[in-house]
Image (cartoon, coloured by chain):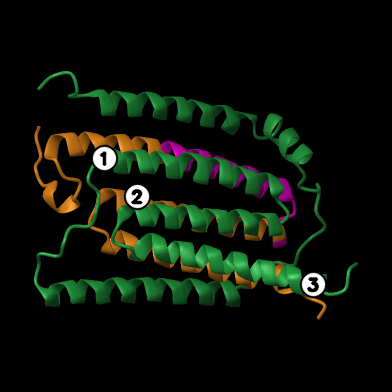
């Protein structure tokens, strides 16, 4: 066997599609804000895996994709910090973090 | 090359793929939130191994450091500060099943569509790489071509820290 399984782009791309589908399933199905945040992280991971795969197999300069994924990780970390602080503020006001009960607006 | 090492490497690769998929399933299917945080951590460990297979040990380390070390621990802190477990289903049984069916259908359609696109896609043939993609090449590119995004992301992180502090602090001193 000249071409190994781990040297084919298809395996990585299908796995990235699976991560994206799992993340979207979680976003639809979850009934708490933290669960939806975790599903969002899965979607970020799917995008990062896709970038890394195409960077390895297609792109002319293999450093660019790595730098992009590094920026993506930084943005994901910032997003988690902001989202968790919003969740804690919501919990303090409503005593609940179910999106169903967050139905009041105040202006 | 040691005979049989191919099988070991392929088995390791299969293990990493299975770890990633199982972690993702655990992260979205379990009802206790702490279990789905653990699923996310397992998924990120598998992804770190896959990054190693994709010729990027640096990003494998960063994935473990940022996702498992920072993101999952931060989410665990969030879990400790609120009551995030999935509530017992109060709505009618039929409605619940219907929504579950819709969710499975939508995600299966997305999985099928994206898989078909990525397997049938006419990717351009690989060209000769300009750099070797090593840590040295990444560092040089970060300090020359990509120095502006590099500075901007540090600004984004600073603003995110300040914003998180400001939002989480509001309403704590009174009542």
Q: Chain of mark 3?
A: B
- Contact check, label 1 and label 2, Cβ < 8 Å: yes
Label 2 packing within 10 angstroms: few (<14), some (14-19), many (20+): many
Closer to us: B23 or B163: B23
Residue stretch in magenta? A57-78
Residue identifier under label 2: A37
Return the residue found at the far top.
B173
Looking at the rendered structure, which numbered label has been put on residue B82? none
Q: Quadrant of residue B147?
A: top right
Q: In the rendered image of this protein, does residue B148 appear above or below residue B22?
A: above
- Gap in Å between the C-alphas at discs 1 and 2? 10 Å
- Contact check, label 3 and label 2, Cβ < 8 Å: no
Q: Which chain is green?
A: B
Closer to us: B112 or B46: B46
Q: In the rendered image of this protein, does residue B155 appear above or below residue A54?
A: above
Q: Position of residue A101 (x, y in %)?
A: 12, 49
Residue identifier under label 1: A87
């Amino acid at each position: 066997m000249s071409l190994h399984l781990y040297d084919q782009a298809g395996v990585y791309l299908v796995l990235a599609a699976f991560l994206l589908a799992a993340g979207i399933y979680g976003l639809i199905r979850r009934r708490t804000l933290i669960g939806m945040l975790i599903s969002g992280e899965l979607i970020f991971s799917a995008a990062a895996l896709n970038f890394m795969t195409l960077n390895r197999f297609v792109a002319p300069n293999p450093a660019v994709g790595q730098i992009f994924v590094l920026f993506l990780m930084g943005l994901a970390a910032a997003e988690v910090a902001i989202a968790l602080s919003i969740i804690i503020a919501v919990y303090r006001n409503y005593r609940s973090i179910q999106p169903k009960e967050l139905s009041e607006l105040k202006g | 090359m040691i005979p049989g090492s191919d099988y070991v490497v392929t088995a390791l690769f299969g293990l990493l793929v299975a770890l990633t998929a199982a972690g993702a399933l655990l992260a979205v299917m379990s009802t206790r939130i702490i279990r789905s945080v653990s699923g996310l951590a397992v998924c990120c460990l598998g992804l770190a191994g896959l990054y190693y297979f994709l010729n990027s040990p640096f990003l494998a380390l960063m994935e473990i450091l940022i996702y498992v070390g920072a993101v999952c621990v931060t989410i665990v802190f969030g879990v400790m500060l609120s009551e995030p477990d999935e509530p017992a289903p109060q709505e009618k049984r039929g409605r619940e099943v219907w929504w579950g069916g819709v969710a499975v259908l939508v995600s299966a359609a997305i999985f099928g569509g994206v898989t078909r696109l990525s397997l049938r896609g006419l990717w351009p043939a690989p060209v000769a790489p300009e750099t070797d993609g090593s840590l040295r090449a990444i560092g040089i590119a970060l300090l020359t071509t990509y120095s502006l995004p590099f500075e901007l992301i540090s600004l984004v992180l600073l603003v995110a820290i300040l914003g998180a502090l400001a939002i989480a602090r509001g309403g704590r001193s009174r009542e």
